[in-house]
């Protein structure tokens, strides 16, 4: 019995000594833990669980203020919170240095374009267009086209959209923009072709594209198609400015 008790005690003592001798064995470096929290924050943000995403990204930044992914996620969080002025410093940290986070650079360019800072946005877009490692070129070109469209640069917008559609023929954003560009250029048959493709891929369409379709079919003399688009516009978006225009006709 004494031998058994002694062996048990030795075993317990051995376990305690091992645990105290190597306390750092299970502790990951701060940078690695920061990355894990950033990954969790991204997942929660994608699911719409904003409160938990904020908790996780704050932990990530507490562990490593220079974590590019964490700074990028925090920028997106600030936009989601409608605190756009607070988002920019985080975007800048995410793209700082010779190895910028390309997804952050893309979203930062979109952010700048929405705020009317077109030159800065175009510089960032240009950097990504020259980056052969950046895979989201179709979406990038679509956003470049949208930024040109916002500046009323329709020729440049059309060129970018056509390049986007060569890479992804079923891009709803690019098809929508091409519908708008053709409509503004007074090309009804071409406009019909673009929005027909847009609806064929299953895009529901907002009030703007439905109004364009209504006006285009009316111009082309198809009363049934025009009435169908008008009905969809009134029923789906009765409070929209486009629906109000219909009531004035």
Image: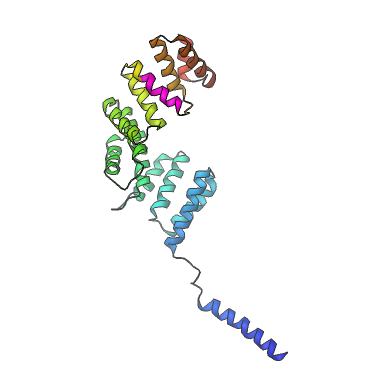
Identity of the residue furthest to the bottom in this view: 2
Q: Main secondary structure of the magenta part?
A: helix
Looking at the picture, how far across and down is residue 165, in whole percent? 34, 32
Viewer can see residue 72: yes
Q: Using the image, determine if residue 152 lies above or below residue 246.
A: below
Where is residue 128, by image quadrant? top left
The quarter of the image holding the N terminus is bottom right
* Residue at the (44%, 61%) spot, across then down: 32
Residue 137 in percent (x, y) is at 33, 40
Relative to residue 226, is residue 132 depicted above or below? below
Which colour scheme appears in the figure? rainbow
Label tally: 0
* Foreground of the two, 121 or 179: 179
| Residue under the point 53% across and 21% down | 236
In the picture, which quadrant includes the C terminus? top left
Query: Horizontal placement of 76 versus 162: left or right?
Result: right
The stretch of residues the image draws in magenta is: 191-200
Residue closest to the eye, 67 or 206: 206
Query: Viewed as shown, does residue 140 lie left or right of 20?
Result: left
Is residue 177 a member of the stretch shown in magenta?
Answer: no
Residue 144 percent coordinates (x, y): 32, 34
Residue 183 in view, yes or no: no
Tell me residue 25's x, y (percent): 49, 72
Residue 178 sits in quarter = top left
The residue under the point 41% across, 51% down is 69
């Amino acid at each position: 019995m004494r031998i058994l008790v002694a062996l048990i005690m030795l075993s317990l003592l051995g376990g305690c000594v091992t645990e105290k001798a190597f306390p750092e064995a299970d502790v990951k470096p701060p940078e690695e833990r920061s990355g894990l929290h950033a990954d969790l924050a991204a997942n929660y943000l994608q699911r719409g669980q904003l409160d938990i995403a904020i908790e996780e990204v704050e932990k990530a930044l507490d562990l490593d203020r220079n974590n590019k992914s964490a700074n990028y996620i925090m920028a997106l969080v600030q936009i989601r919170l409608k605190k756009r002025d607070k988002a920019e410093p985080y975007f800048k940290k995410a793209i700082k240095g010779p190895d910028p986070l390309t997804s952050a650079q893309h979203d930062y360019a979109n952010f700048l374009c929405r705020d009317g800072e077109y030159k800065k946005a175009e510089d960032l877009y240009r950097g990504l267009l020259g980056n052969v490692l950046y895979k989201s070129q179709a979406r990038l070109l679509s956003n470049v086209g949208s930024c040109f469209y916002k500046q009323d640069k329709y020729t440049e917008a059309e060129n970018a959209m056509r390049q986007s559609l060569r890479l992804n023929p079923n891009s709803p954003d690019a098809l929508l923009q091409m519908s708008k560009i053709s409509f503004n250029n007074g090309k009804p048959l071409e406009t019909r072709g673009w929005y027909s493709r847009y609806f064929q891929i299953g895009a529901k369409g907002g009030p703007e594209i439905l109004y364009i379709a209504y006006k285009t079919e009316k111009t082309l003399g198809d009363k049934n198609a025009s009435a169908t688009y008008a009905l969809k516009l009134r029923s789906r978006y009765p409070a929209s400015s486009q629906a109000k225009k219909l009531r004035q006709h």
